[in-house]
Amino acid sequence: MIMDGDLHGLERTVEREMGLLRGLPDVAPRPECLARVQAAVRAEALRAARRGPLRRWVRVASGVAAAAALVFGWTTWSRATRGPALPDPEAVVAEWAAALDESNYCLRQLTTSGWARGDATRDAAAELDELLQGLDDSFERFEGL
Amino acid sequence: MDRTGLDELLRRARQRDADALGRLVELYSPRVFGLVYRLAGSRDAAEDLLQETFLRVVRVIGEYEHVGKFEAWLFRIAANLARDRARKRQRRGEGGVHDDANGATSARPAPAVADEPAEALERREAGERLAAGLQRLPDADREIILLRHYSELSFREIADLLHVPLGTALARAHRALQRLRRELSAEE
């Protein structure tokens, strides 16, 4: 096991050794590449600025639609079942809303960030499976309601 | 750029201000390009990665919280994209192609100039040997020393960025640098 003092010593050694890379030839993007990147970034910034309000509107609208569907589903279900062993309706609704929130968050992350969220340890395919499973579960609960 | 200037620039960039984002490209593209060029091993790939990195920045900067160093966030995006690209190439059986990363500023190593002073020629050749040696290192080892060289983050920050213990990051860097030094002395 490496102790703190050893780590400091190793860090100092490696920092000294890093001097070797000072001999690395300089590289720079070609001016035409830089111009292309600048243009692409500006265009994307404009698109993102336009998309911002639309995305917010879609989120709000989908939230309202989900709430309406939930109320409708809840009313229908409570009319149909009047047995004594009903689950706590507030808990069911809260659970479903939390699952929907989580799905929304994952979906938003997926559409805005792709997989480069800085988390190098997560497997993209597994994360996608989780997301789809989460959506499935969410719809299943909704059907149950 | 001082801390206040950068804070203000990032505040505007988070609002998708095109000028502020353009300024970030201007400020950071030389170092980001250096990193992705040495990681990807070709100028064409590096140019694509540079553009992808900054497009990703535009898309996700709204979620960036300016609490640490901006470099840590930016270089993590660049390194992740370069790693994803390398994985895809490996899956397609295209790994290990480094077409020009031992050259300097052009797509191919610059030809020797007849009247180049001996000292400059020697320095250039040593630089090319160093770049070629870097390409032969294992990807994970190369990534750490290149991140340290181009991002100017500390090894501790790089270890956090790569989600590895500091000791592992240092050990990899130490091993890579020793191997490079050995190869260079053997060639001399």
Image (cartoon, coloured by chain):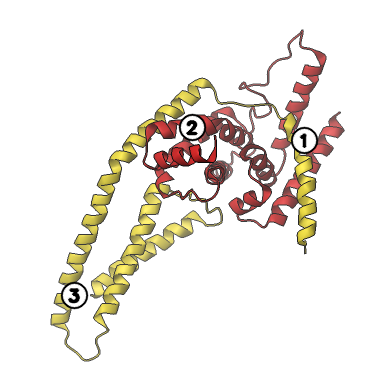
Chain colours: A yellow, B red
Q: Quadrant of residue B104?
A: top right
Letter of the chain that mark 3 sits on in the rendering:
A
Indicate the position of residue A114 as horizontal and vertical percent values: 43, 48
Residue B159 shown left or right of residue A135 in the figure = right
Q: Residue at x 46, y 31 (%)?
A: B23
Q: CA distance from mark 1 to mark 3?
A: 69 Å
Residue A98 shown left or right of residue B73 in the figure = left
Q: Where is B145 relative to A71, above or below? A: above
Identified by mark 3, the residue type is Trp
Identified by mark 1, the residue type is Leu
Per the image, the residue denoted by label 2 is: B25
Q: Residue at x 37, y 49 (%)?
A: A111
Per the image, the residue denoted by label 1 is: A20
Image quarter where the C terminus of chain B lies is top right
| Residue B141 shows in this picture | yes
SS for callout 3: helix
- Return the residue nearer the eye: B23 or A85: B23
Per the image, the residue denoted by label 3 is: A74
Circle 2 residues within 10 Å: few <14, some 14–19, many ≥20 = many
Q: CA distance from mark 1 to mark 2?
A: 28 Å
